[in-house]
Image (tube, rainbow, N blue to C red):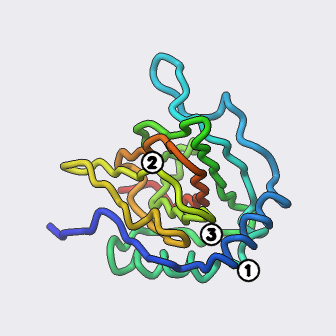
Amino acid sequence: MANHPPYWLWKNVLSLKEIKRLNKLIMSNYSHEEEKNQQARHPDGRPKKNVKTYVIPYRQLKEYISKLVDKAYDANLRAYNFDLWPYGDEDNCLYNIYSGDEKAGYDWHVDMDNNPYVDIKLTLNINLSEKPFEGGDLILQMTNDIKVPEWKERGSMIFFKPHSRHKVTPVTKGERRNLILFIKGPNFK
């Protein structure tokens, strides 16, 4: 049985100047804010997250992040060799803003697609925070919970298997901004 890493991390793939340009571009060009009734919920109906999520088509960001997406596809070949579809112009990205004033976080969840013929194979998460923040830790649940403090460095990027439970602890100070791309493919076999 192959030993696959629980995640891949790249530090400082974007400069502060690039992050500011992306944040401005996203806030000027997003298509809509995610509706609260479409967000993940606990079995009792309570929301799992209290985050502002904006949806933006990949085509709006492609020029600025395609090299980062290419890094993820290349790492997939070395780490997992999942059957992936290319990230297309019509695919969406999610831009999350976690506010320390609201103690924003996202409880334990897995990332899934509503289409029964599609599986999300990788969750790609790019840290677009312009300033340091407190809390907002990414925790991956494997055999033990794995905290990924390196991802909190501005401009860092991580991918992991979306079917692994994960959460974001509440932000207690500042603001955590991240861009999420769900890299998909045909159903796992």
The nearer-to-camera label among 3 and 1 is: 1
**Could you tell which of marks 3 and 2 lies nearer the N-terminus?**
3
Residue 79 percent location from the top left of the image: 32, 74
The reply to whether discs 3 and 1 touch (Cβ–Cβ < 8 Å) is no
Residue furthest out toward the top:
44
Secondary structure under the numbered disc 1 in the rendered image: helix
76 is higher (above) or lower (below) than 167: below
Instruction: Name the residue located 53 percent from the left edge and 69 percent from the top edge.
Output: 154
Q: Amino acid at mark 3?
A: Tyr
* Disc sitting over residue 63 in the figure: 1
Residue 60 percent location from the top left of the image: 78, 68
- How far is disc 3 from disc 2 in space, using C-alphas? 31 Å
Within the image, what quadrant is residue 37 found in? top right
Within the image, what quadrant is residue 149 found in? bottom left
In the rendered image, which residue does mark 2 sit on?
Answer: 135
Q: Amino acid at mark 1?
A: Glu
148 or 141: nearer the viewer: 148
Badge 3 density bin: few <14, some 14–19, many ≥20, Cα 10 Å: many
Instruction: Name the residue located 40 percent from the left edge and 72 percent from the top edge.
Output: 9
In the rendered image, which residue does mark 3 sit on?
Answer: 87
Q: Is residue 96 left or right of residue 116?
A: right
Q: How many marks?
A: 3
Give the quadrant of the N terminus. bottom left
Q: Amino acid at mark 2?
A: Gly
The nearer-to-camera label among 1 and 2 is: 2
57 is higher (above) or lower (below) than 66: above
Badge 2 density bin: few <14, some 14–19, many ≥20, Cα 10 Å: some
- How far is disc 3 from disc 1 in space, using C-alphas? 13 Å
Badge 1 density bin: few <14, some 14–19, many ≥20, Cα 10 Å: few
150 or 29: nearer the viewer: 150
